[in-house]
Amino acid sequence: MGNPQLLRAMNERLLLDQLTDHGKASRGELAKITGLSKPTVSAALADLESAGLVRMVGSVSGRPGPSTALYDMNVRAGLVAGVDIGRDWIRLAIADLRGDFIGRRDVRNLAKSSAELVGAVHELAEQVASESGVAWTQISYAVIGSPGVLDPATGRLGLAPNLPGWDRVGLVEQLHTTLGVESVIENDINLAAVGESVLGAGRGLRNFVLVSVGTGVGMGIVINGELYVGGSGAAGEVSFLPASEQDVASTDSRQRGMTETAVSAGGVTEAARRAGLTARTAKEVFAAAEDGDPTARAVVAAEGRRIGSLITAVAAVLDPELVVLGGGVGRNLDMLGGAIAERIAELGPLRPRVVASELGDGGVLHGAVARALGAARDLLFDRR
């Protein structure tokens, strides 16, 4: 015979998940959908309501008999936060338990050291919480998106050259302590892939990749509907793929990766400089190309060909249903698409479908919030 306490918890979780995923419903509707008896549904809803996880949100009348109560999850039973830490920007959002943002702010990253950056993240967290009318301490769970790969054995972040000092001993612990809420750090591009899976171009797909080309170059991989990070968390570090433009890696490209050195925004700017352009950023190069400057157009076309080579390598290994291009450079698919397709066609028969990110700068935040929601719901249910 089953454990009554375990069965009760399983029934409660089944109903809570149903309300979370599909919204308000009556006891009769929940019984029909879940296959549970009406008395079992009533008892489980009473327990969830007593724990503050479910609330009555209205009633339905207009038919014979008494009105029917409608129940829904209590979206304010807890709050979650997503944080995106990049070289140029820090982004932070607070969301309710259905994932709806109640506050968000993006600020320039002006920190001169890793310690300053930790302080800036904490200051932004308090600011967004205040603007949202909540206390930061109300956050049930936060997920922090950061470049690099966290080594669980040492607690250090590696492979994050664009954030100086970000790999120092004690940095991760300091960040968790300063924020003061339960939190975890994940790779930012992996989170962007999660965001596209939940709300963006990857919705409904079991196998796709997000290739981000911006300040850095990285890839998030979704296989069989799940994020794939590899044996040590470094799956998708395509910045370290060999680049055909360089026979021998320089010191800088050994640290950043040959592909990142050539393909990232910095690579575009350097290529423009070598071509005689005065553009100071990749954004300026693309703007000049859009205005018809032939030299800038040639630089952009060369960048598209490099991205096409990268996508071909990825497609040969993973055969994804879709390649989503993100990042400040990558999402300019309207200007890069022709050269990308041309290069892919030159390299062989593989023809992966390539689209631009639907979430843009918000991809990491949406992915972070999605990951935080799963953890927070588990925590709140266990604590009930």
Image: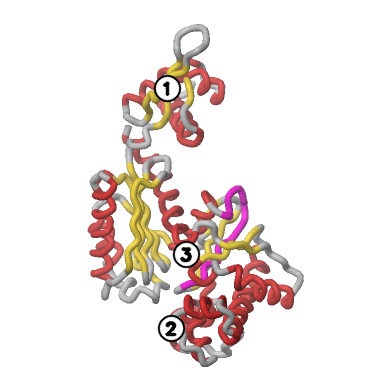
| Relative to 321, residue 72 above or below | above
Q: Nearer the viewer, residue 285 or 202?
A: 285
Q: How many residues crowd mark 1 within 10 Å: few (<14), some (14–19), many (20+)?
A: few
Q: At 33% from the left edge and 37% from the top edge, which residue is drawn?
A: 76
Q: Are marks 3 and 2 in contact (CB under 8 Å)?
A: no
Q: Secondary structure at mark 1?
A: helix
Q: Are marks 2 and 1 in contact (CB under 8 Å)?
A: no
Whether residue 264 is visible, yes or no, is yes
Query: What amino acid does circle 3 point to?
Result: Ser
The image position of residue 184, as x and y in percent, is 36, 55
- Where are the magenta residues, as a range? 201-214
| Relative to 197, residue 257 above or below | below
Q: Find out whether residue 135 is within the magenta segment.
A: no
Q: At 67% from the left edge and 73% from the top edge, which residue is drawn?
A: 338
Query: What amino acid does circle 1 point to?
Result: Pro
Image-based side of 353 in relation to 31, left or right = right
